[in-house]
Amino acid sequence: MKGGVSDEVTLSAYITAAFLEINASVDDPVVTKSLSCLKESISDLSNTYTTALLAYVFTLAGDMETRAHLLNHLDTVGIQNGGFLHWSQTASETSASLSVEISSYVLLAKLSASPTTEDLGYAAGIVRWLAGQQNHYGGFSSTQDTVVALQALALYSALVFSPGGSSTVTVQSPSDTLTFDVNQNNKLLYQEKLLQDVTGKFSLEVKGTACAAMQISQHYNIPTPTDATTLSVNVRTEFDCAIKNTKLTLILQSRFSGKETSTNMVILDIKMLSGFVPDQESLKRLKGAVLVDRVEQKEDHVLVYIQELPKDIPINHSLDLRLEIPVQNMKPAVVKIYDYYQPSDQAETEYTHPCVSA
């Protein structure tokens, strides 16, 4: 759970925040020394992710002077669009994953120190933007940004919660009217209704005094995007078709060609060919391979967590598969590679048994 940056400052900030969230005293020697080290790093505020994380840490520590300094800087780099407010790591950020995490830390910093009415108004703009990034299941792009965002949204919800009041939400479609009643008996209950119209104008009206969050989700299928990606993976298979052999070897080559010197954590998702399972000894060797952080086996997939991929240097890994059940008319399987924190940066390729004719 290293977020958008992997260095000693952010790691120290995560650990310090964990201590402070369980009400550790700022006079504890470990916390005191950590805060001192973190304060020394504040001279450089060029990294928005680190700045937002430190703002939250010093809010928890009760250091209002340092907190104000960090939040004042964040105010100058915030991205405001109408009633929406958020932050990005870079001006050319293409994925919302890091932006969600950064904006959530700013929200936590704003709300974790006896917020005023002005603070709650400021926070509302961040909440509006975060709500717009949620998928229809309520989560976000990755585990990390979902954890931080839900923590921030839960804190905001607790602060603006009102035990009384009720509201009626009316959704008008071209051919139908849907009504949601939000009252004291059901205000914590999730409500969902299906809109019959796909196209046309829709209107939303709310009457009452209770606060409610509304989301509209549209589901549709599209062809696989052909967007440019900085990641690639090639698979070569080794198998002696002349002899009776049950072992198939995959040689996987992963490459990063982006602008940065290296990637974030990268996931290599290897789907098994029908009838094949990963060889357990080979899995053990893969766990100790270069740059591999851990390996997981989930049903007919093997997930390889690669710490990072250096720029323009191909990284090779191998995995042996063992034939468990003979299968006729075997179809190709897919190997997918993607950035853990920016899942939109991905690529995939197919492989098949070398003895199976097309």
Image: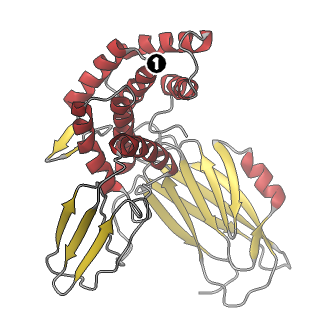
| In this view, 79 is above or below 316 | above
**Outermost right residue:** 244
| In this view, 47 is above or below 68 | below
* Residue 228 appears left or right of 139: left
Q: Position of residue 341 (x, y in %)?
A: 46, 48
| In this view, 27 is above or below 130 | above
Examine the image and state in which quarter residue 228 appears: bottom left
* Residue 286 appears left or right of 339: right
Q: Position of residue 226 (x, y in %)?
A: 35, 67
Q: Position of residue 259 (x, y in %)?
A: 36, 41
- For the C terminus, the image quarter is bottom right
| In this view, 326 is above or below 27 | below
Q: Residues within 10 Å of mark 1 (few under 14, many from 20)?
A: many
Examine the image and state in which quarter residue 225 appears: bottom left
Q: Secondary structure at mark 1?
A: loop
**What amino acid type should be assigned to the residue bearing mark 1?**
Ala
Residue at 37 percent of width and 49 percent of height: 163
- For the N terminus, the image quarter is top right
